[in-house]
Image: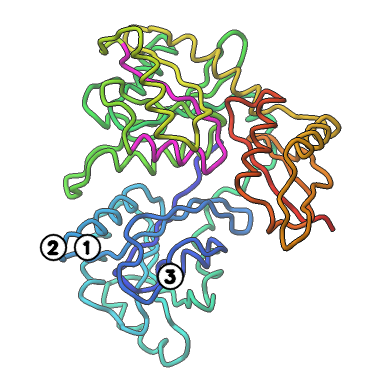
Amino acid sequence: MQAKPVIAIVGRPNVGKSTLFNRIAGKQKAIVIDEPGATRDRNYMDCVFREKAFTLIDTGGFEPASEEKILVQMREQSNLAIEEADVIIFLMDGKDGLTHSDMEIAKQLRGKDKNVFYVANKVDGDRHKEMLTDFYRLGIDEIYPISAQHGAGVDELLTIITGNFTAVAEDKDEEDMQIKIAIVGKPNVGKSSLVNRILGKERSIANPIPGTTRDAIDMPVKVHGKNYLLIDTAGIRRKSKISMTLEKYSVVQALKSINRCDIALVLIDAEDGLTDQDTKIIGLAYERGKACIIVVNKWDMIEKDNSTVGKFVEDIKDKIKFMDFAPIIFISAVTGQRAPKIFDLIDKVYDQYTKRIGTSPLNDLVEKSVQRNPMARYQNRQMHISYATQTDIKPPTFVFFISNTKGIHFSYERYLTNQIRETFGFDSVPLKLIFRKKR
């Protein structure tokens, strides 16, 4: 499975980046208000345009010369997106014309080995089109006029951008024969060392300098007769012109790999404990419905007593309540301590991740669960579940047909989730519950 191309939208504040992001993504995810700096961090969305799949990144406003702290941080976020993007949409304001900030951004983009599309937004009529000639002062071959708000020109732009992208694969039989394992985590937690331990040779360069591995490396491996695909993703090297901690780089890299995997092995450093960056990476896996195993590496470096493991597990589960079902294993990639047991855990998790439950036993459980704990009334009417069925795996997905979807409370959804977990043995994987109104 090939990694999806990454498209980043960059530009100075208030040129319509988030509006274009929402237009392409097809849903209102980014904040859109008429105020510079509304988007301060990076937004991600997996998109498909005419059977071409890609990951879209929305960035905060890019002010090349500002020293104001928040604008410096936003510029750093934009730089991060540029580093990881395959294609850059440089968005400018067609009503304002070419500005000094636009020229500075264009100058920085020329130094990148990237495919850049120069796009003028807010071009809503012939009067605005007449102003486009000003943009050619950048020394570019083509300026693409669009209106992100009204959609004019957006499909044409995407058609050109995605022209060389690979169409979504239809035949996945060969891929499905492999269990795809992404090894993710912040830089220097031992990802490449773990891969080398598993493979028994120096397949990946293991170096104590953070960020040795630039790109994801795919490695097929067979263990006990089963085929696995290891996706090793180490941190990205620090760029001399970007004053950002290395941990920030790993987010985009982890995103690419998590999109491709069945199970994410999230390595954390036993000496550091679970950091905010680790939590963010685990959150990426959770949002995408991926199974996850928490691998606490460098366990040999920790002074231990009888309560050390229990306290460590409790601390992790307390910080990732949304993923507290994820198994936790303590290893040392360097010494090999407990590293072989990872595959036993992978097999257990994958079995649950691909498990299917028959409609009859599922509905028997639902009936008993509702009898024990009836649904609350909504708009003075008793809520009830008519029917339930499993519709998918990876993650196991269950559809409930109910009398009114607005009446389902999150606490009752959690109750049903727990009942399914306990009854059918889904104790280590995410579950997806969908509620639909009975027609």
Residue 315 % position (x, y): 37, 27
Residue at image mark 2: 67
The kind of residue on which mark 2 rests is Glu
Percent coordinates x, y for residue 147 in the rendering: 48, 78
Q: Earlier in the sequence, mark 3 or mark 2?
A: 3
For label 3, count other residues whose C-alpha is less than 10 Å away and answer few (under 14), some (14-19) or many (20+): some
Query: How far is the residue under mark 1 from the one under mark 2?
Result: 7 Å
Give the numbered dot on residue 71.
Answer: 1
User: Which image quadrant: the N terminus?
Assistant: top right
Please say if 285 is above or below 149: above
Q: Mark 1 near mark 3, Cβ–Cβ under 8 Å?
A: no
Image marks 1 and 2: residues in contact by CB distance under 8 Å: yes
Q: Nearer the viewer, residue 406 or 259?
A: 406
User: What's the amino acid at mark 3?
Assistant: Val
**Residue at the left extreme?**
67
Q: Is residue 421 left or right of residue 9?
A: right
The mark closer to the camera, 3 or 2, is 3
Mark 1, Cα crowd under 10 Å, few <14 / some 14-19 / many 20+, is many
Q: Quadrant of residue 134?
A: bottom left
Tell me how far mark 1 sits from mark 3, CA to CA.
18 Å
Q: Which residue is mark 3?
A: 32
Choose the circle earlier in sequence order: 1 or 3: 3
Mark 1: secondary structure = helix
Pointer 2 local density, CA inside 10 Å: few below 14, some 14–19, many at least 20? few
Residue 85 vertical position relative to residue 261 in the rendered view, above or below = below
Q: Which residues are magenta?
A: 277-299
Distance of mark 3 from mark 2, alpha carbons? 25 Å
